[in-house]
């Protein structure tokens, strides 16, 4: 009996198949390991703060600046960039509105998928009439008094935040502080619009 008969000859094709299977299974094994050990990246790619979990907007409790009711259904179907206001719209408020407009225009061909909303703290503010003339495409709204309006104030908790991104299904999903970088806001919106198939 020769040595060749004792030691089996390995088929190179088997090694190639095993290598292909290992390459195919490796990403799944890595993903399972990351999930199992609850690994999270130290920093995320977004500039705003994600609202976890996203908050659904109340179905009612909003009105136009002139007092007409504004159903929440009228706000669905587009991405919204909302500025929460308190009191009258003074210099800082107008600066923020200008920045919101610049962010929308910078979206180029996607700008039609975004609407801007000013949640007015004081709907009786006479400056709102001037704002409507300066920004005809700006929707000015205010929470009504009572429980329904309080639900809106809770959904757009303006304690530490000034700007909110609302998805086309009516969920508040991202928020920004008062001094948020407009470039970061634009980058977040570009990414959302690029990968979203709604709105």
Image (cartoon, rainbow, N blue to C red):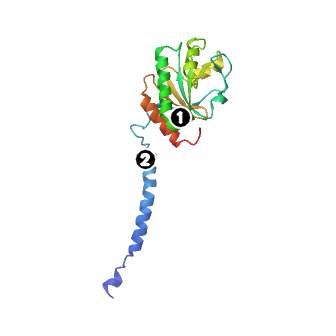
Residue at image mark 2: 34
Q: In which quarter of the image is the C terminus?
A: top right
Left/right placement of residue 118 relative to residue 67 reads left
Looking at this view, name the residue that lies furthest to the left. Answer: 3
Secondary structure under the numbered disc 2 in the rendered image: helix
Looking at this view, name the residue that lies furthest to the front. Answer: 133
Residue 138: percent from the left, percent from the top?
Answer: 57, 24
Q: Residue at x 32, y 87 (%)?
A: 2
Q: Which residue is drawn at 42% across and 31% down?
A: 183
Pick whichever of labels 1 and 2 is earlier in the sequence. Answer: 2
Q: In which quarter of the image is the N terminus?
A: bottom left
Q: Residue at x 40, y 65 (%)?
A: 19
Q: Which residue is drawn at 36% across and 79% down?
A: 9
Can you tell which quarter of the image residue 155 is in? top right
For the residue pair 25 and 120, the one nearer the viewer reads as 120
How crowded pointer 1 is (Cα within 10 Å; few <14, some 14-19, many 20+) is rated as some
Looking at this view, name the residue that lies furthest to the bottom. Answer: 1
Residue 93: percent from the left, percent from the top?
Answer: 49, 18
Total count of labels: 2
Can you tell which quarter of the image residue 8 is in? bottom left
Image depth: mark 1 or mark 2 in front: 1
Residue 180: percent from the left, percent from the top?
Answer: 43, 26
Is any part of residue 165 visible from this angle? yes
Asked whether the beta carbons under mark 1 and mark 2 sit within 8 Å of each other, the answer is: no
Residue 43: percent from the left, percent from the top?
Answer: 39, 37
Residue at image mark 1: 111
> Is residue 89 placed above or below 99 in the rendered structure?
above
From mark 1 to mark 2, how far is it between C-alphas? 37 Å
How crowded pointer 2 is (Cα within 10 Å; few <14, some 14-19, many 20+) is rated as few
> Is residue 123 placed above or below 102 in the rendered structure?
above
> Is residue 189 placed above or below 94 in the rendered structure?
below
Tell me the tag on residue 156.
none
């Amino acid at each position: 009996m020769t040595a060749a008969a004792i030691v089996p000859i390995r088929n190179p094709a088997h090694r190639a198949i095993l290598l292909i299977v290992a390459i195919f299974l490796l990403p799944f094994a890595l993903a399972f390991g990351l999930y199992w050990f609850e690994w999270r990246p130290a920093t995320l790619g977004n500039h705003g703060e994600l609202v976890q979990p996203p908050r659904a907007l109340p179905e009612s409790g909003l009105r136009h600046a002139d007092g007409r009711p504004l159903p929440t259904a009228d706000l669905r179907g587009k991405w919204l960039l909302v500025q929460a206001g308190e009191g009258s719209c003074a210099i800082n408020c107008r600066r923020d509105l200008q920045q919101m407009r610049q962010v929308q225009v910078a979206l180029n061909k996607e700008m039609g998928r975004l609407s801007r909303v000013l949640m007015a703290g004081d709907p009786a503010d006479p400056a709102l009439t001037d704002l409507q003339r300066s920004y005809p495409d700006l929707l000015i709204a205010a929470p009504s008094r009572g429980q329904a309006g309080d639900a809106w104030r809770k959904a757009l908790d303006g304690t530490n935040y000034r700007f909110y991104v609302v998805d086309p299904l009516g969920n508040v999903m991202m928020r920004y502080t008062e001094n948020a970088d407009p470039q970061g806001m634009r980058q977040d919106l570009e990414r959302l619009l690029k990968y979203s198939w709604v709105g």
